[in-house]
Image (cartoon, coloured by chain):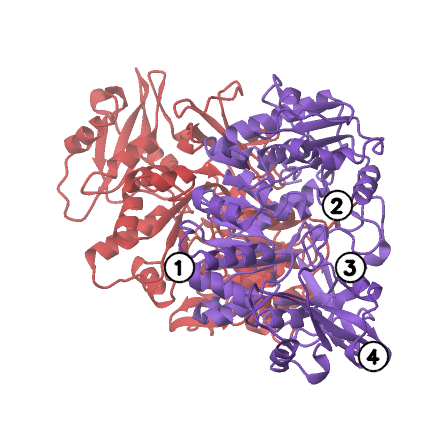
Chain colours: A red, B purple
Amino acid sequence: MTMQQTPLLMHRLMDRGAMLQPDVEVQTATETGVRSQTMLETRNRAHQLAHALNDAGVQIGDRVATFMWNGARHLEAYHAVACMGAVVHTLNIRLAPVDLEYIINHAEDKVIIVDADILPLLEKLAGKMPSVEKIIVAAEPGFENWSTSLPNAIDYEEFIQDKPKKYDWPEIDENSAMGLCYTSGTTGKPKGVMYTHRANYLHTISIAMTDVMGLSATDTLLGIVPMFHANAWGLPWVATMLGMKQVYPHRFMVPDHLARLIMDCDVTISAGVPTIWQGIKGLMESKPDQYKFKALGRLTCGGSAPPPSLIEWFWNELGVEMVQGWGMTETSPLATISRRTSKRKHLAMSDAERAANQAKAGLPIPGLEIEIFDDQWNPLPHDGKAFGELLIRGPWICSEYFNNPQPDKFHDGWLVTGDVAKIDPEGYIIITDRSKDLIKSGGEWISSVDLENHIVGLAGVAQACVVAHPHPKWDERPVALVIKKPGADLTAEQVVSHCESKFARWQLPDDVLFVESIPLTATGKMDKKVVRAQLEADGYQLPDQR
Amino acid sequence: MTMQQTPLLMHRLMDRGAMLQPDVEVQTATETGVRSQTMLETRNRAHQLAHALNDAGVQIGDRVATFMWNGARHLEAYHAVACMGAVVHTLNIRLAPVDLEYIINHAEDKVIIVDADILPLLEKLAGKMPSVEKIIVAAEPGFENWSTSLPNAIDYEEFIQDKPKKYDWPEIDENSAMGLCYTSGTTGKPKGVMYTHRANYLHTISIAMTDVMGLSATDTLLGIVPMFHANAWGLPWVATMLGMKQVYPHRFMVPDHLARLIMDCDVTISAGVPTIWQGIKGLMESKPDQYKFKALGRLTCGGSAPPPSLIEWFWNELGVEMVQGWGMTETSPLATISRRTSKRKHLAMSDAERAANQAKAGLPIPGLEIEIFDDQWNPLPHDGKAFGELLIRGPWICSEYFNNPQPDKFHDGWLVTGDVAKIDPEGYIIITDRSKDLIKSGGEWISSVDLENHIVGLAGVAQACVVAHPHPKWDERPVALVIKKPGADLTAEQVVSHCESKFARWQLPDDVLFVESIPLTATGKMDKKVVRAQLEADGYQLPDQR
């Protein structure tokens, strides 16, 4: 072999930030204000945590779960568990107890690190987690005097104290597991995606490229996307590799608190779902003089597509670029990216044209192949019109679920994403719908996402959700659920007439229902499965069927 | 395996640029002006070249040599040969015939692609290249009517014409060879570094990171560093992956021509050795009104360290950031990087402090380990004072030479670079010298590079070269060779007295010789081996020995 065979292991990247920028801060929001520790302290504490876990019997390949908000100790757990050769299993703290129980037992977690303030959520599973040998409780200020009914619990600080600050990271095979995340599973049982060192290493350096996330050692990240959600979009890994300043909101997830962190901690880039940015926008519109974001340059958006109007607002009002990424737990997760300027020709484009591009899922990140196929697995043209199942392959894409192969989710080496998409002549992926959320009317497909994006652009609309409802003649017809902005005066006719400007007659919603809230999944997306089921349970009938 | 086992092959990256930016131009300087072709044409021609080579019997693993200037056809050869599974062997067109002959025969090149204007250089080897079955002649405007004494020669255009524009790139092992480059070998025979797909893939995406080269799809690259030199610093691979506009100077390497390409082609970033930038600076100082670089933002410098004065000049006069990289053929080549702002704390630094950092070799690129060792292989402290052999390891570092293992160049999994360096508390690598260029005086070491960098900061000095000369008492003593700027009035005493401000008495040069030129290696570095040999051959004596 003429070149060195260095295994692609996360420890090669994760100790680098503290070496180059030891004094840069990692900050966590707490009851008593922002708590700071340095990058070097964070690194040293990660090494201590690894020693403590090793002393507690955690071996290479064992699963160590986290049940935590975003914070410095969660970051330490990422660093320690992955680098020591164990598997950091991020539990979604918003899941129902029955799902959590299934996941913990399916993963056979050996240890759970839990934030003290959410101990009660975990205590509901007392006696139902036979594989768990130890509970490590991380207590932020105000929660130091925790107590629990769970057995074998120890305080995080006591657990790591006096441990050596240098762990000799093992040289294991680069295809070894290092992370585990279960998909929220809108159908069937949750399924585990087991990340490997090789896949996550490649994802980490790929998303640090200028044209992807474009992260720099001089950036300050506000990490809003939960660290229990889809590998936290890869951000904690990149930020630690570069020694970036990192700010984590912990449980303080309301818009006002997030906006204050952006201001007070000199945040340059943040990452979260569109509803977060809608909330920040609402806040700033209602109290224009209270919030000034001096350093902020970019917001990364994912989870669902942001409306172009939101993208334009952030650019026009704040000079903030909204970067859209698309991916899923199964894709580590970043697969495509859409920047304000993703191509040379964009330099000459208007703001509106750029925002239209930014609202698309984006262009494939180098190293990935993304294609659309019809139901006979024939590839479809990239004409911006044909749509079909989106398939993806590449070095950080899942090839099977953990101990649950699910062969129908994979085809000939590709991941079948479950998304329906178009690819336009510029190479942009445009997500039309989740395949199960498409509305089939009279043999033609109607995109619920296209209708929602359009409706949300109407003044007075805060949120919109379009679902299919069964129809005896047409098979399915679209129904729009709309949340009005406070005080807005809006009629169903206005919503439908707004849609007429863009959609064909047969694509218009048959009904518009004004609602107070829309059910969300554990990861904060609109749960259309629940919406559809509720309509059915309520005996809802379409207008022409009443 | 839970994640896809996608081999890291160059074709995953190299077809991407044309897919996303088909209309962006690849430009080549010619006798009749700049010749343009699109990225899509370049990609299609690469696929055609692969077909033609395959039809001519080139198989996976075979060496296809290039004997070419930087230009679009050279880029096509990179693309085609690597992606088809063969090995692109870049021959240094400045080598002596005896070295070329050795290299071609050692590599067993099967095909040579040669620029028509330098055919005569290759013809000197007629009858001495038994492995070479075919010569492909690339003719820029003005050279179409080439003829040659070499057998089996065919015009490049004739060779690829009518071939299909889609080659089915093979799925081979990621550790397969894809590139070959011989080091210019200041001692012994040239040694071949065989790049693999895995190593070059990782190098490509790593140098595209924001904090490394920071290249973007919107950049325009002027590729000055020869494509036959150290993998062209990896730039053609990154540029093609991103679909960047690329400009290549071909044989028009004089400062005036390069400066005009920067102006006329909207170049945003260029890359070359410090002497190139010294030349451009001289030109702009002598004719300040003739050159305006509107788009230029960064110059990447490598091969040897640029003096801080040069870095400051480009920043102060042109607002151009000089990015320094350090590496060698054996390291693919980029190993360290030094940017104007490489750390958060640099944001608060003065221009002079930043330039001082930029003049250092830089910080290690993520994924690499770099250490200094004493002669017993004990690691030395990172205190900015201790210096020793620089060793390096990581996934794109050479582990043996091609068919010439040279075990003394490797130690316990590390590459022994042959450079002597310090590492400062900030983690910066500072190259003290090539180990063979250090001057050993009275048991103490004197850095020839430190003296040169200081002397070149004296007004009136164009270039300086410090070498060791044997001394009966002290073992070796430093002698400085200095080229004056035109018209400069300068004495040896002034040079020595300038050195006294920074160096101890025993470190001062014993003699200053004003010369008209300094011999260069084939890659454009000062050839101190030749300088030392010439002094010996001339019977030169140190002042105290006369």
Q: Mark 4 — residue?
A: B545
The front one of A545 and A278 is A278
The front one of B409 and A501 is B409
The secondary structure type at the circle numbered 1 is: loop
Q: Mark 2 — residue?
A: B95
Residue A268: assigned label = 1
Nearer the observer, disc 1 or disc 3?
Answer: 3
Horizontal side of residue A488 vs A389, given as left or right: left
Hey, what amino acid is under mark 1? Thr
The front one of B397 and A239 is B397
Q: Is residue A211 visible?
A: no
| Label 1 in the same subunit as label 3 | no
Residue A209, compared with residue B392, is above or below; it is above
The secondary structure type at the circle numbered 2 is: loop
Hey, what amino acid is under mark 2? Leu
Sequence order check, earlier mark of 3 and 2:
2
Residue B530: assigned label = 3
| Label 3 in the same subunit as label 2 | yes
The secondary structure type at the circle numbered 4 is: helix
Which quadrant of the structure image shows residue B161?
top right
